[in-house]
Image (tube, rainbow, N blue to C red):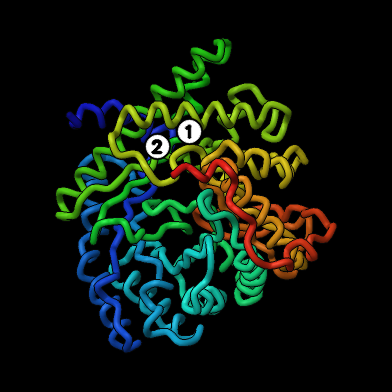
């Protein structure tokens, strides 16, 4: 049974250790909004979102006040718009009208972000997919709260290298379209391999076609809580270390489970999953990097970093699955650069490189996240980075993603400010050798042999 006593047990975590529920995300299916008339389609989308989500923010605020649990974000995810707009949208600019509708609806119900301006192209692209992808730079430039994602590969289908090449160009164009805001549009765009249907975290959230008409997903977070727990076992062996992380993850996930169930009951919408990812913020003490350093590293990036992160990720999942029967999304440890003060510090002193971050993504929750790179980075180099990260996901049967920000007009060593939860980041160097001939081959990289399990 979940009860208020479990919440009271976490009061210290909330008040002193940055424990929060990072997001309540309402997933909404737009399949019944489909229409061949673009104006009617936009009307249907706006009406359904504003009807279903009208009480989302107020309900979140009530739960926050009643239980004393900070709920940082209230968000919406929708069915991938490439599917919804396929009949009505004949060119990229048509999709941009849907992005504006999503933004208008998000503002009306006062959510922080709305995700699902997305295309799933792991095996091939329809004309609608291609038009949506080509519309992304403008769509993210003319909206405030819309987030976009594109899934370019999976373990079952391999990597769609045509889509990878195109996304290299789209990321760079998005940076250009939003260069007056330090290329902020790229912070709302993520490229996936093995994207989950029920992820509550932005920018990669969308409402999968296998989901119910509406669903409540919750993402919890507590890097500061885990780090504080580990300060009490500094001289202990790995068994004690792992048990401590598991027990802490259990308590954190129970808080998320309580909030999810309560929101579901009050909104009359089914509960979906709890994503128990450790998602850092720029706040001091709310850092995944600090956890790794508490485990025994001088700085993130030192030898042993990948092993420490693997240990952390696994124990968080083991503790979380004992606390909730419905754990999903990404679940593990995020390692964004700009959103984690410890990561920023490690980059600044030269302990952490993109290559080491890539190695770490083999064992973490997602991938190369919120990394600022020079604005003159070529589209083919960005595509190569995406291909590398997607290959890790494909081979390892896990979700990986790339959210890099080529900051137009800035170079290595300069700093870019994003503000809020997005924080700030030093511009990191990328390998200067070309992969253009590789990227331009076209076609698909086949699925690995272990994908054939039917």
How far across and how far down the image is residue 232, in percent?
A: 49, 16
Could you tell me which secondary element the residue under label 1 belongs to? helix
Rendered view: 414 above or below 334: below
How far across and how far down the image is residue 368, in percent?
A: 62, 49
Residue at 83% from the left image edge and 57% from the top image edge: 432
Can residue 17 be seen by looking at this rendering? yes
Q: Which residue is mark 2?
A: 19
Left or right of residue 304: residue 454: left
Which residue, as the protein is rendered here, is positioned at the far right?
433
Left or right of residue 306: residue 286: left
Rendered view: 65 above or below 288: below
Q: Which residue is mark 1?
A: 224
How far across and how far down the image is residue 129, in percent?
A: 49, 73
Label ID, residue 81: none
Q: What is the spatial separation of the Cα atoms under label 2 and label 1, in whole angstroms?
A: 7 Å
Quarter of the rendering containing residue 341: top right
Residue at 62% from the left image edge and 45% from the top image edge: 392
Indicate the quadrant containing the C terminus: top left, top right, bottom left or bottom right. Answer: top left
Q: Are marks 2 and 1 in contact (CB under 8 Å)?
A: yes
Left or right of residue 88: residue 380: right
Residue at 30% from the left image edge and 35% from the top image edge: 255
């Amino acid at each position: 049974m979940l009860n208020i006593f479990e919440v009271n047990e976490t009061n210290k975590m909330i008040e002193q250790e940055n424990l929060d529920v990072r997001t309540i995300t309402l997933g909404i299916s737009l399949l019944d909004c489909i229409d061949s008339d673009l104006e009617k389609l936009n009307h249907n989308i706006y009406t359904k979102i504003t009807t279903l989500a009208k009480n989302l923010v107020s309900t979140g605020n009530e739960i926050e006040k009643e239980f004393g649990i900070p709920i940082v974000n209230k968000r919406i995810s929708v069915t991938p718009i490439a599917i919804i707009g396929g009949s009505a949208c004949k060119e990229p600019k048509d999709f941009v009208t849907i992005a504006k509708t999503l933004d208008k609806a998000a503002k009306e119900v006062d959510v922080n972000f709305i995700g699902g301006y997305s295309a799933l192209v792991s095996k091939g692209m329809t004309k609608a997919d291609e038009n949506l992808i080509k519309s992304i730079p403008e769509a993210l430039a003319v909206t405030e709260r819309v987030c976009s994602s594109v899934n370019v590969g999976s373990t079952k289908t391999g990597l769609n290298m045509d889509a990878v090449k195109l996304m290299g160009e789209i990321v760079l164009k998005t940076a250009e379209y939003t260069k007056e805001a330090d290329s902020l549009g790229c912070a709302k765009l993520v490229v996936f391999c093995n994207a989950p249907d029920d992820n509550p975290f932005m920018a990669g959230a969308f409402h999968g076609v296998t989901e119910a008409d509406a669903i409540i997903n919750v993402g919890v977070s507590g890097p500061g809580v885990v780090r504080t727990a580990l300060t009490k076992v500094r001289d202990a062996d790995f068994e004690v270390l792992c048990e401590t992380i598991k027990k802490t993850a259990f308590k954190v996930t129970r808080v998320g489970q309580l909030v999810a169930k309560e929101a579901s009951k009050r909104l009359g919408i089914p509960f979906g999953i709890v994503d128990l990812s450790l998602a850092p913020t720029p706040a001091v003490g709310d850092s995944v990097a600090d956890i790794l350093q508490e485990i025994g590293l001088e700085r993130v990036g030192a030898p042993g970093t990948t092993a420490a992160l693997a240990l952390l990720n696994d124990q968080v999942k083991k503790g979380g699955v004992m606390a909730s029967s419905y754990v999903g999304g990404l679940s593990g440890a995020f390692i964004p650069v700009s959103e984690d003060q410890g990561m920023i510090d490690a980059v600044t002193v030269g302990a952490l490189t993109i290559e080491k971050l890539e190695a770490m993504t083999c064992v973490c929750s997602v991938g190369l996240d919120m990394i600022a790179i020079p604005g003159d980075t070529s589209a083919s180099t960005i595509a190569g980075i995406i291909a590398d990260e997607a290959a890790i996901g494909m081979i390892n049967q896990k979700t990986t993603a790339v959210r890099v920000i080529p900051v137009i007009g800035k170079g290595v060593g300069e700093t870019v400010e994003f503000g809020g939860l997005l924080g700030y980041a030093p511009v990191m160097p990328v390998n200067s050798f070309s992969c253009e001939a590789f990227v331009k081959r076209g076609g698909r990289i086949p699925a690995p042999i272990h994908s054939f399990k039917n």
